[in-house]
Amino acid sequence: MVIGAGMTSAIMNPCRPQEMEAVRAANVLNGTDPNCMTWIKTYKDHAPSAAGAPVAAAAAPAGGDSGGRRRGGRDARRARG
């Protein structure tokens, strides 16, 4: 039995682009991506969305579908009340 050992990494889904982007950003900020080469290779062809809107917001479907977002929260409470 090991006492005091904590988790060294997060439990995450590598199929979600948002999570992988966060991991790549953390690697850049922590200095574990030498010369930011992984970040540069991944995003060298990235084109910003129109009018500077976040990509997730621009791609969200209309009609109340959460599009994979977390259920509940402030919006759900407002809809119920």
Image: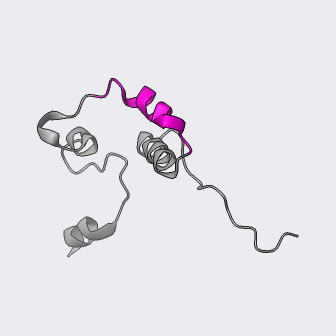
* Horizontal side of residue 36 vs 10, given as left or right: left
Extreme right residue here?
1
Find residue 25 and report its horizontal and vertical position in percent: 44, 46
> Is residue 60 on the magenta stretch?
no
Find residue 50 and report its horizontal and vertical position in percent: 14, 34
Instruction: Identify the residue at image location x=84%, y=69%.
Output: 2
* Horizontal side of residue 5 vs 43, given as left or right: right
Find residue 54 and report its horizontal and vertical position in percent: 23, 44
Question: Looking at the figure, which quarter contains the N terminus?
Answer: bottom right
Question: Looking at the figure, which quarter contains the C terminus?
Answer: bottom left
Main secondary structure found in the magenta portion: helix
Instruction: Identify the residue at image location x=28%, y=43%.
Output: 56
When the figure is inspected, residue 51 is found, relative to residue 44, above or below; the finding is below
* Horizontal side of residue 38 vs 6, given as left or right: left
Which stretch appears magenta?
Answer: 32-46
Instruction: Identify the residue at image location x=27%, y=66%.
Output: 76
Find residue 52 and report its horizontal and vertical position in percent: 16, 41
Instruction: Identify the residue at image location x=81%, y=74%.
Output: 3
* Horizontal side of residue 15 vs 63, given as left or right: right
Colour scheme shown:
one colour
Quadrant housing residue 71: bottom left
Taking depth in this image into account, of 41 and 50 the one nearest to the observer is 41
When the figure is inspected, residue 69 is found, relative to residue 1, above or below; the finding is above
Taking depth in this image into account, of 27 and 63 the one nearest to the observer is 27
Extreme top residue here?
45
Quadrant housing residue 57: top left
Extreme left residue here?
51
Q: Number of labelled discs? A: 0
Taking depth in this image into account, of 21 and 40 the one nearest to the observer is 40
